[in-house]
Image: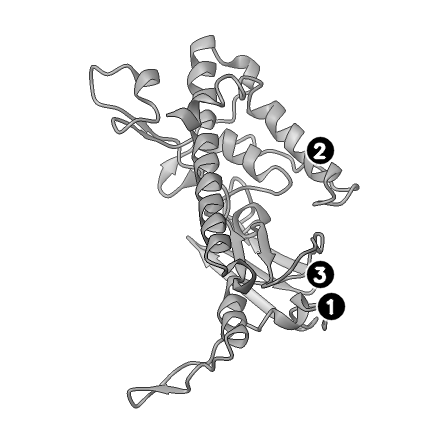
Amino acid sequence: QRYIDQYRGAYHIGYDSLRSRRFQGLKEKGIIGVKAALPQLPDLKGALYGITEKPLLPWSSLTDEEKLIEAHKMEIYAGMVSNLDYNVGRLVKHLKQTGEFDNTLFVFFSDNGAAVLDENMTPQGVDVYQAMGTANSFVGYGPPWAHASSAAFSFYKGYAAEGGIRTPLIVKMPGQQQDKGVSSTFTTVMDLAPTFLELADGRFPETREGRSLSPIKGESMLPFLNGEQQQVHGPDYAVGWELFGRCALRKGHWKLTKIEPPFGKGQ
C-alpha cells in the first residue's frame, strides 16, 4: 500500500496530458528522435481478445468520480513499478555484498507492449475505489492509459504495431563502469539465448536424447555489446510476427503491418 500511496494525485492530470508529457520527455532524454511525431489516436471502437473496447473519451469529459477512479488505476500501476524497482535494488545490493556484481550480466526488459484490458472487478457491496489495489480487486488500467504508456508508438499489447512489439531493453555488461548511451539497433528476444551461451562459453547442442534439435534462430549480441560490431543483425535479416491475425514483417528500415478494421484495412 505504501507504494501506491506515494503516487496519490500524481495522475490527476489525466491520460491525455500524461501521454504528451511522456512523449516530450522521451525526446528530451534522447530516447526518440527530435523529429518524431506523436501518433494519432484511433477514434473508433474495435475488438481485442473478443472484448469491445470503449471509445477513447477525452479526460475533460469524465466526471470527477470517474477521474478519481481512472487516476487511481495509474497510481496502483506506478506503485507496482516502484515495488519492482525496489526489489531490483535489493538484488543489486546482494550481488555487491557477495562480490558477484561485476561478474553478472544484467538484462532488463518489459513484456510486449502496454496491457490494454480494462477490468475493475470487486465483490458486491464493496466500495470500488477503496478496494482497488487490494486483495479484493482485479484492476486493469484500460486503453487510454495504455496509449499513454506506449506514448511514442502506435497501439499496445496484442497488436503488431510498434506499441505492441517494441520494448525497452537495458543491458549492463559484467564489469561495465560507464553508460554506453541509447542504441536503436534491431534485436529480438531470440538473441538473448545465444548471448548468454557465448558469455558463459557454452554451446547449444545439435541433439538431445537422440533427437535432433532445431538450431537457435537468434544471434549473439556480444559483438555489438563489446563494440566490435555496429549492428546485431545484417541488413537482410527479416523477422515476422502474427497474433490474432494481426501480422508484421520487418527487414532493415522497412516494416509491413496488417491490422483489421476499424484500426487498419485488414491487408
Question: Residue 29, image x and y in percent?
Answer: 72, 40
Question: Residue 128, image x and y in percent?
Answer: 31, 18
State the CA–CA distance, disc 2 to disc 1.
28 Å
Which of the pair 17/60 is nearer the observer? Answer: 17
Q: Which residue type does callout 1 highlight?
A: Gln
Q: Is residue 148 above or below residue 207?
A: above
Q: Which residue type does callout 3 highlight?
A: His
Q: Earlier in the sequence, mark 2 or mark 1?
A: 2
Q: Quadrant of the C terminus?
A: bottom right
Residue lying at the far top in this picture: please name it: 64
Structural crowding at the residue carrying mark 2, measured as other residues with C-alpha within 10 Å and reported as few (<14), some (14–19) or many (≥20): some
Residue lying at the far right in this picture: please name it: 35
Name the residue: 67% across, 73% down: 236
Q: Earlier in the sequence, mark 3 or mark 1?
A: 1
Structural crowding at the residue carrying mark 3, measured as other residues with C-alpha within 10 Å and reported as few (<14), some (14–19) or many (≥20): few
Question: Residue 112, image x and y in percent?
Answer: 49, 50
Q: Which residue is mark 2?
A: 24
Q: Secondary structure at mark 1?
A: loop
Residue 230 - label: 1
Tell which tag, 2 or 1, sits nearer the viewer. 1
Tell which tag, 3 or 1, sits nearer the viewer. 1
Name the residue: 60% across, 62% down: 173
Which of the pair 4/239 is nearer the observer? Answer: 4
Q: Which residue type does callout 2 highlight?
A: Gln
| Count of numbered circles in the view | 3
Q: Which residue is mark 3?
A: 253
Which of the pair 66/172 is nearer the observer? Answer: 172
Q: Is residue 70 above or below residue 244?
A: above
Where, by quadrant of the figure, is residue 25 drawn? top right
Q: Earlier in the sequence, mark 2 or mark 3?
A: 2
Q: Secondary structure at mark 2?
A: helix
